[in-house]
Image (cartoon, coloured by chain):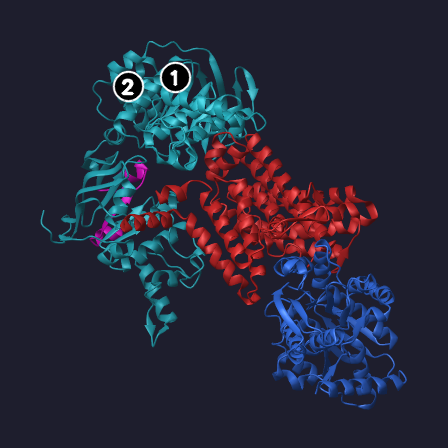
Amino acid sequence: MMQRLLQSRGLAQIIALLVILALDRAVSPQFFDLRMQDGRLFGSLIDVLNRGAPVALLSLGMVLVIATRGIDLSVGAVMAIAGAIAASLADAHGMPVALAAALGAGLLCGLWNGFLVAVLGIQPIVATLILMVAGRGVAQLITEGRIVTFTAPDLVWLGNGAVLGVPAPVAVELGMLVITGAVVRGSALGLLIEATGGNARASELAGIGTRAMILAVYVWCGLCAALAGIIAAADIMGADANNAGLWLELDAILAVVIGGTSLFGGRFSLVLAMVGALIIQAMNTGILLSGYPPEFNLLVKAAVVLVVLLLQSPRFASAGAVLGRARQ
Amino acid sequence: MTSKALLAATALVAITLSLPATAAELTVGFSQIGSESGWRAAETSVSKSEAAKRKVTLKIADAQQKQENQIKAIRSFIAQGVDAIFLAPVVSSGWDAVLKEAKEAKIPVVLLDRDIDPSGKELYLTAVTSDSVHEGAVAGEWLAKAMAGKACNVVELQGTVGASVATNRKKGFDSVVAKNANLKVVRSQTGDFTRAKGKEVMESFIKAEGGGKTICAVYAHNDDMMVGAIQAMKEAGLKPGKDILTVSIDAVPDIFKAIAAGEANATVELTPNMAGPALDAIMAYKAKGTVPPKWIQTESKLYTAADDPQKIYDSKKGLGY
Amino acid sequence: MNASSDPGSALLEVRGLSKSFGTLRALQEVDFTLRAGEIHALLGENGAGKSTLIKTVTGVFPRDTGIVRLGGAEVAPRSAKAAVDAGIATVYQEVNLLLNLSVAQNLYLGRQPTRFGLVREAEMRRRAAELLAEFDLHIDVAEPLGNYSVAVQHITAIARAVDQSARVLILDEPTASLDRHEVEILFAVMRKLALRGIGVIFVTHFLDQVYEICDRITVLRNGRLIGERETAELPRIELIRMMLGRELAGTTSERAAAKVRQAGEVCARFEGYGKVGCVAPFNLALRRGEVIGLAGLLGSGRTETARLVFGAERADSGSATVEGKPVRLQSPRDAVAHGFGYCPEERKTEGIIADLTVRENIVLALQAKRGLTKPLSRAEQEGIAIRFIRLLDIRPPEPERPIGLLSGGNQQKVLLARWLATAPRLLVLDEPTRGIDVGAHAEIIRLIRELCDDGLALLVISSELDEIVTYSDRVIVLRDRAHIDELEGEAIDVSNVLAAIAATGTAGAEAGQA
C-alpha cells in the first residue's frame, strides 16, 4: 500500500513540499499570513514563490535538457550575461531593446551549447562547462566588474511589479510554465524528447531527428536562463555579474532531480520540476525565518534533500513497505 | 595597538606630504588580484591616480584571481628592475619563494589590502590594510551614539560564512554591542555579500519580526547587502532610514545615493586608496631610508547624511565601483 | 577418458551447463570437452551462446546448473580473476590492457617483481623480454604498449595469461581487427602453446581460419550443443549446415504453400549501392508483396545491407529510387519519410525505448513521420495502440505498461506495430525471431507472410536458413561483405543456399547458377 502510494507519480514531491511548509509554519507562526502591500500580495508564502522564481525558471529549461540525457551547467553564467545586457541597455535604449537583446543572448548561448552537444557530439557536462566558466567572464566584461544599476521603470516592474496582486516574477514563472507546457505537451515534442532521452539510437532509427531535438532543448534552456537573469537583475535593480546566478545551476539540477526526472534521461515532468524548485526555496526561506545560525544552512539543506530523495527511491519505498507489513 | 598604528600612519602621511617629490621617475609594479568586485576596480583606478599624482610610473598586472599569475608578474617585475613591488595577494600562503627573490634583488615589497602568513613577515617592507574588526566597531559605535541609550533590536546581514572579513566585521560590531546593554542583535543571517541575498534575507527578517515593527536597525557587513535590504524594506511598506536605521560598511557609491535620499543612515569606508599610503612609504624609504611600520592601517571613516552624500557619490561613481 | 595431462586427454570438461537470463534460455544442457594440446574452435551465429558459455565457465556469470572439471578436478570460479587463478585465462577482442603503460608493466601488472617493497624495473624488463622471446617477439618492452600494433597487444595479453600458469587459454575473436600478416604471427603463437600442452579455445566467425588452425570444432545454436567434430572430417558445407540449418525435412512443403503469391511492381530500387568498408556495391529491387531473404554468415554484410537501405549508413556509391523517383537516403529520417521501416537486430539497444509505454513505443515512428506540429492526441494514440495490440496479439494487452517489462517476442511485435502504424511500403527486419520463444517465433513468421500478402515489400535477415527458405520469394546470398548470389523460385532450398554460402571464389557463382 505504502509502496503504491509513494510510487504514484508526484505524490512524494507534493508530500515533501507540504511537510516543509508545515515545518516552516512551525518555526515561523506567521508563515501563512497574507496581506496586500502596495498593490501586491505580501507574506512568506509569496516570498517562496518570488525568490524561487529564478531557480524555477532555470529548472523549466533544465528538465528538458536532462530528459534528453544531457545537463546544462552554464545556466547560472547565462543568467549573469542576460542580466548584464538588460541592465546596461535598459536606461539608454528602453525596455524592449534591453529585453530582446538579453533574451537573444540567452538564445545564442543555448545554440552554442546545443551545437557542441548535438552536432559536435561533445559530452554535455564538458560542453556546457565551457560556457559556465567563460560566460561569467563575458558578463563581467559587459559590466566591467561593477554592479550596473538602472531605473527604467518597466524593467524594474519585472522585479517589483504585480499582476492582479501576484508579484511579477511569480507571474512570469507561471506564464513560462504554461508556455513551456503548451509547447512541449501541445506538440509531439514531449514524447520525442522522452524517446530521445530514453534511447537515442533507437529514436534515431525510429525516424526522430534527435539532433534537432537536442539542439532545441538547449536553446530553450538558454532562453529560460536569460529570463531568470532578467528577473534577478530587475529584482535588485542592477546586474551583479559576479554573483547573479552563481551556483544556481546546481539548484536547478537539484530541483529537476527532486522533481523525479532521472539524470539518465527519459520521463520528465515540468510541473514536478517546478515543485522541486519550490521545495528548495521553501527550505531556504524556512531556514532564514528560523533564526538558526547561518553556519547550519547548508547542513539543514543537505539533510532535507536527502530525505526527499530517499522518499522517491523505489528501494526505500519497498523497504518501507516491508517494514510496514512486519509491524502489522 | 590599533590606535597606535593609526597614529603612526597619520604621522607618516604628514611627513611624506611635506616632502617634495624628490625621487624622480620611480617605477612601481603592482600585482593586482583582478577585478572581481567594484571595490577592486576602484582600488585599481585610485592606485593609478595616486601614482600619477606623485609622478610615479605604476605598472599594473591583473592576475585574474590566480596566484600563479601573480607570481609570474612579480618575477617579471624583478626582471624589469622596478623600484618597488605592490602585491594584493589573492591567497595568504605560498609567497615565500618569490618574495625571497624580490628581497635578494633588493626590491621592497608592499602588501596592499590583504596580509600573508606570518612566516613571510621578513620578506616584505610593510602591509597597507584596513582593520575589519575596527570597521565593525566604528559601525557599532555610530549606532550606540545614535540610539543614546534607547533600546534597539538589531538585525545583522553577515557576509559569506567563513570569510575572514565577515568574521571580523561581526566581531567588531559585537564588541560594541557587548558594551551597550540597550543594543541587542535579534537576528543574524548570511547574505553572502550580495544584493540579491541581502534583499531575500531582509524580507524574511521583516516577516519574522512582526512585519519589521520590532526591528530598530539593520547592520550589514557590506553596502551591497544593505542596498538589497533597503529595497526589501521599501517593498514591505517600511521607510528605511527612518522606521529602521541602517549602518553598513565599504562606502560604495550606491549607498551614498541612498543616504542622500534619506533611505540609509551611515556607512564605514573601506578606502580604495591603499596605494597612496604605500607609495608614500616607498618614497620615504627610497629617499631617506625611513623604514615604515610593519602595518600601515588605513582609516575607517564614517559617513552619514551630514557629509554631503551627493557630492561623495559624484566623486566616487567614476572610480569603477 | 582419463584425467591425466597426457596430450590428447580431456583437459577441460563442461557437462550439462545451463544458463537463463529471465525467460531467455541462453544455454541449455551444453557439454564441451577441450583436450590438452589442441586448438578447438567454438562456433555459432550471434546469440548461439558462445560468449555465454565462455563467461559462465570463467565465472563472469553464475551458472544455473552443470559442472566444470579442469584436469579432472571440479572448479567453480566466482570471477574472471578466480578463473585465471584456477588456470583458465581469457583474452577478449578488446584487449584489457593499459595502453599508456609499458609492455613490461602490462605483463607484470599486479605481480611486479619487488625487493624491499620497491618494483625492480630492470628485473621486470629482463623477464618481460625473455617471456616475449618465447613467442618470437623481440621488441623494446620499455615502450608504451599503445605504440605497438593490435597483434602485439594481443600477444602481450596472451603472454601475460600464459605466464600466469594458464592451462586453458580462451581467445574470443582475436583476429577480428588483424591483417593477414598479423594473423600469421598469432597463429604461430597459438601452435606453440598447443605444443606445450595448453588447450586453446578459439572463437571466431572466419571459417577459413578455423580450417587453417583448429583440430576440433564445437558448434552451438540457440543455446544448444549441435555437435563436436574433428575438423579434418567435417566438410565446410556440413559445418555451415550445423551453424545455420535446422531440420531439413518438411520445409519444402511449407514453402510450396507460401508460393501462391504474385510479386507486384518494384517499389524501391537500389543500383550500384554500397559503401567502402561496409558492403560492396549491389543491385536490389524490392517489389510489393515480395519477401527477399538475406542469407549469409555473421559478418557477411547482411546487417550492413539493411542499414544502407534504411539510411542508417550513408552510401558512397550508387543511386536509390522509390516508386521510380530518385531519392537520397541520408538518415533514417529520410527513409521513414519515404515509407521505409526497420526492426534492428539489437532490439534492446536500437529498438525499444524501455522506459516508455507500449502505446508510446507503437506511435513513435508515426509521430516522427507526421512531425512535431501534428501531435497525435492521446485518444488517437490509444486507438492505434489498442488496434495493433489486438491485431498482433501483444501480451499483456495493456497499452500503458512500460515495454521493458514485456517478453522478447512481445517487444518484437510492438516494434512491428511501430512500423505497421506508419503504413510503410518497405519493411526491413533484421533477425526478427532472435531471442524469441518458440510460440512467438511461429507467430512472427506467420505475420511476415500476412504482411506480404497485404502488399508490403519485405527485406528479411535471418540466421535460420529454414526460416528464410520458408517465407522468401527471393534469397540473396552474401559473403565477405558482398552480394554473391541470388536464388529464386524453385531454386530456393536449404541445400542450395548452403552451397552458395560455402562455395569459395568462382565456385560460388557456379553453384548459384546451377
Amino acid type, label 2: Asp
Part of the protein shown in magenta: C192-215
Q: How many marks?
A: 2
Question: Could you tell me if residue B19 is visible in this image?
Answer: no
- Image colour for chain B is blue
> In the image, is A264 to the left or to the right of B273?
left
Residue A80: give x, y in percent of width and height: 68, 53
* The furthest residue to the left: C2
Q: Tell me: C441 left or right of A162.
A: left
Image quarter where the C terminus of chain C lies is top left
Q: Chain of mark 2?
A: C
Residue holding disc 2: C493
Q: Chain A in the picture: what colour?
A: red
Q: Closer to the camera, C182 or B151?
A: B151
Place residue C285 in its image quadrant.
top left
Q: Which mark is residue A186?
A: none
The colour of chain C is cyan
- Comparing A244 with C425, the one in front is A244
Callout 2: few (<14), some (14-19), or many (20+) C-alpha neighbours within 10 Å?
A: many
Q: Which mark is residue C451?
A: 1
Could you say which quadrant of the image residue C350 lies in? top left
The residue nearer to you, when weighing B264 against B267, is B264
Image location of residue C256, percent across then percent down: 28, 12
Query: Dot 2 lies on which element?
Result: loop
Cα distance in 3D space between marks 2 and 1: 22 Å
